[in-house]
Image (cartoon, rainbow, N blue to C red):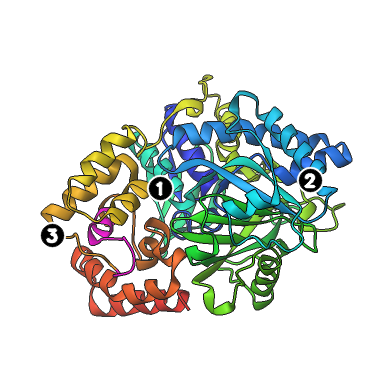
Amino acid sequence: MGGGATGAGVTLDASLRGMRVLLLEQNDFAEGTSSRSTKLVHGGVRYLEAAVKHLDKEQYDLVREGLRERKIFLHNAPHLAHPLELITPLYHWVELPYVYAGLVLYDLLSGKASLGRSRLLPASKACTINPDIDPQGLKGAVSYWDGAFRDSRMVIALLQSAKELGARLLNHTEVTALIKENGKVVGVHARDRIDGNEREYRARVVINATGPFADTIRRMDDPTLAPLMEVSSGVHIVLPARFLPSPDGVLIPKTRDGRVLFALPYLGHCLAGTTDRPAELSEDPRPTEEEIDYLIEHLNGYFDLKVRREDILSSFSGLRPLVREPDKDSTASIVREYVTERSPGGVLTIAGGKWTSYRAMAEAAVDQACEMIGHSPVPCRTHDYPVVGSRSPRDEILTLLRGSGLDQDIIEHLYQHYGDQSPQILALAETEKAKARIHPDHPVIEAELLYALRHEYVRKPLDFLIRRCSLGLLDLQAAKESLPAVVEIMIAELGWDPTFTESMEWEAYEKLR
């Protein structure tokens, strides 16, 4: 259960080990936390600082694993993930050696998995690289390397890879109860949230990979279980590219509550975040005015080009699935490690962690599942398994796309989202006469929607607009303007009747408010 990063990772890992797998997701794949991340593949710079300051082995081990997993991530999905240099502007002399020493240690821990060496930059060089860094009082900067990626597309790539191996994938399908026999969980009751059909599914092992909702499933087995999860909200805003004219990201090292903030180049825009505040469990968390003001305040403290509310193209809030630590005084101080747990009836929960560690989390869960069913030991194969979209050379795919007559921004968009699956979209564009843009200001074309409907489990308009093509993430107003065209294509492709069409369109408009 759970169609986010960890659930998709578990589905692929188990499928590669020869298991029959069914994945159930109550909303769309990656609709929750896994599409609302900071889009970084990282070891965790701030965890390293905590590890050194407090001699915290948990934090140290978390960084080491993150750096190891970062290398695997970038290797297995090169069309979706890439190295990114980040610049940290510093306004106090004492910070320069302190931060530089920490980032050199980060490099050393990377070892052969290093993406590049950290370096000290004079103030003039930092402002040349990014002219919008506030030069007033700037003493210098430090740069270092991490990875960036497209999160919701990564979930789809993992699931397509699992589908190739026989996995069955159902989104918008909610688990309503567990099936128990002699005290042991042997399956689930589930309801399709779109057509209302109910079914039961039997399984030798039920894995709970539902992120922030892990306690909901655990308590279906035993209502008396103490809570395992604590959630916090991470809010991001999306700004026009002029707020980050450089291909490098910017790390703001310390806010008033001790967090780090990022301003990152993302699909031709500037992505900025994130907050970290205790939150209530919700299927559709929304940014608060206070959280958006918080981001604007800190961005304006470091950028000469001031951010105004009217500059924000979109904003989103995601819930971090943190494992509870009662002695911690804030969610920001909770270690982003993961745990596995078996409930009394045998539900296996994998919870916590972060996007970068999704593969290691999946490996740990599937290892335990094998033990539970007495499965003969089969080694994990995801360490070196290129996902769908990453199995043909980049130059070969781009050469093919350039011969299509499509605009350059559309070519780049197709490769960044679909990799070596792009030729299938190009074929649809030709045969279905679907080369037209969904919105005149963005590179998304009609053929992508046809492909997503036929191959990527799109069942609602926002499945496509937000999580398959990223338009709704980047530009909320453009997504609203594109909705009628998207619905029209879905009517033709799926045969919606007028009443159903009206309900789908109304729901989408409500969520885009």
Q: Nearer the viewer, mark 2 or mark 3?
A: 2
Report if residue 23 lies within the magenta region.
Answer: no
* Gap in angstroms between the C-alphas marked 2 and 1: 41 Å
**What mark, if any, has residue 156 been given in the picture?**
1
Horizontal side, residue 63 vs residue 509: left or right: right
Do we see residue 219 in this rendering? no
- 65 relative to 344, above or below: above
Q: Position of residue 95 (x, y in %)?
A: 81, 48
**What mark, if any, has residue 433 been given in the picture?**
3
Q: Position of residue 499 (x, y in %)?
A: 28, 80
* Gap in angstroms between the C-alphas marked 2 and 3: 56 Å
Kindly identify which residue carries mark 2: 96
Residue stretch in magenta: 439-452
User: Which mark sits nearer the N-terminus, 2 or 3?
Assistant: 2
Q: Nearer the viewer, mark 1 or mark 3?
A: 3
Q: Who is closer to the viewer here, 47 or 494?
A: 47
Classify mark 1: residues with Cα within 10 Å, few (<14), some (14-19) or many (20+): many
Do we see residue 245 in this rendering? yes
